[in-house]
Amino acid sequence: METTRWNRLEYKQTGKAAFLANYWPMVGGILLLLLLMGDFLPTRVHEAVTNCITVCQDLALYGPLEFLYTVEYYTNPLALFSISLGMAWLVILFLVSSPFEVGACRFLLESSPTHKVPFSRVAFGFNANYGNVVLTQFLRRLFNTLWFLLLIVPGIIRSLGYFAVPFILAENPHLHYRRVIRLSLDMTQGYKWDIFVTFLSFLGWYLLDVCTLGILGIFYVNPYCYATQAEMYRFLRTRALENGIATLEELPGVQPLPQ
């Protein structure tokens, strides 16, 4: 199958325009999504500090260790939450964050520079075949984790292959989980490197986000990145339909619903 040229700049420009046109709802929706998925600043700081401790121990640099141990403790999710709350958080991850991610993708797909989408659209994943959405998202994470347990690089490649799963569910939440996962793998075939490079192009923004203690990420970088992902999916969907990978019955499109 011949691939069409990937236009990263166009996806970022269009995504940014859609984000700015739906600024506050998109900021709020993506912030809630990241919080539900546990991807917030203390977690990232904890991971970075843990890596620094390992490096200091390897290099026998004991001076900074006391300070680093203190930061590590107070940014540890188990220090922020009790064990019982941690277990509840896992339940939330699968029962709440999974359909919320699909709803966020629905919101992103309906957004455009000329169309404002109500914030309530993020509830789409809860109202449209909730059981299938949760099951498919669970299997996506499970399979991805198993691949990472094998080797890091195959895990990364596989995670890129699962990129389209929540967007497919946002378009058709009734599609069988096996077909959703298979379709995502087929849609991303030949484009995984392009997807990876597009994610990598936000690295500079995320470095600035660290300098602002996560503020820039909340109000600009994260929603900008997610809006770009929606444009990437639009391209993959178009190619899948053109190449007979998917049918219009499977991917019926996302028409903005009445507001």
Image (spheres, rainbow, N blue to C red):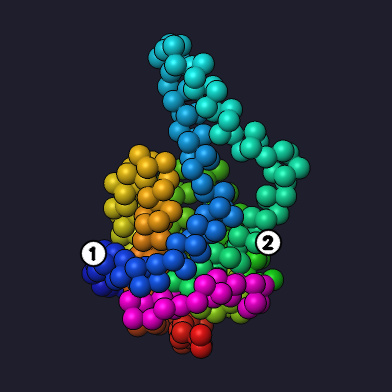
Residue 44, placed above or below residue 2 = above
Q: Are marks 2 and 1 in contact (CB under 8 Å)?
A: no
Residue 56, placed above or below residue 51 = above
The magenta segment is 109-130
- Magenta stretch: includes residue 122: yes
Residue that label 1 marks = 9
Q: Amino acid at mark 2?
A: Leu
Residue drawn at the location 36% of the way across and 61% of the way down:
224
Where residue 233 appears, as percent x and y from the top left, is 39, 70
178 or 116, nearer to the observer: 116
Is residue 246 rendered to the left or right of residue 228?
right
Q: Which residue, as the protein is rendered here, is positioned at the far front?
A: 24
Residue drawn at the location 64% of the way across and 55% of the way down:
93
Quadrant in the rendering for residue 136? bottom right
161 or 259, nearer to the observer: 259
Secondary structure found at label 1: helix
21 or 199, nearer to the observer: 21
Residue drawn at the location 52% of the way across and 27% of the way down:
71
Is residue 104 rendered to the left or right of residue 231?
right
The mark nearer the N terminus, 2 or 1, is 1
Residue that label 2 marks = 95
85 or 249, nearer to the observer: 85
Report the Cα–Cα distance between label 2 and label 1.
35 Å
Q: Is residue 135 visible?
A: yes
Where residue 238 appears, as percent x and y from the top left, is 36, 79
Is residue 224 rendered to the left or right of residue 149?
left
Q: Is residue 11 visible?
A: no
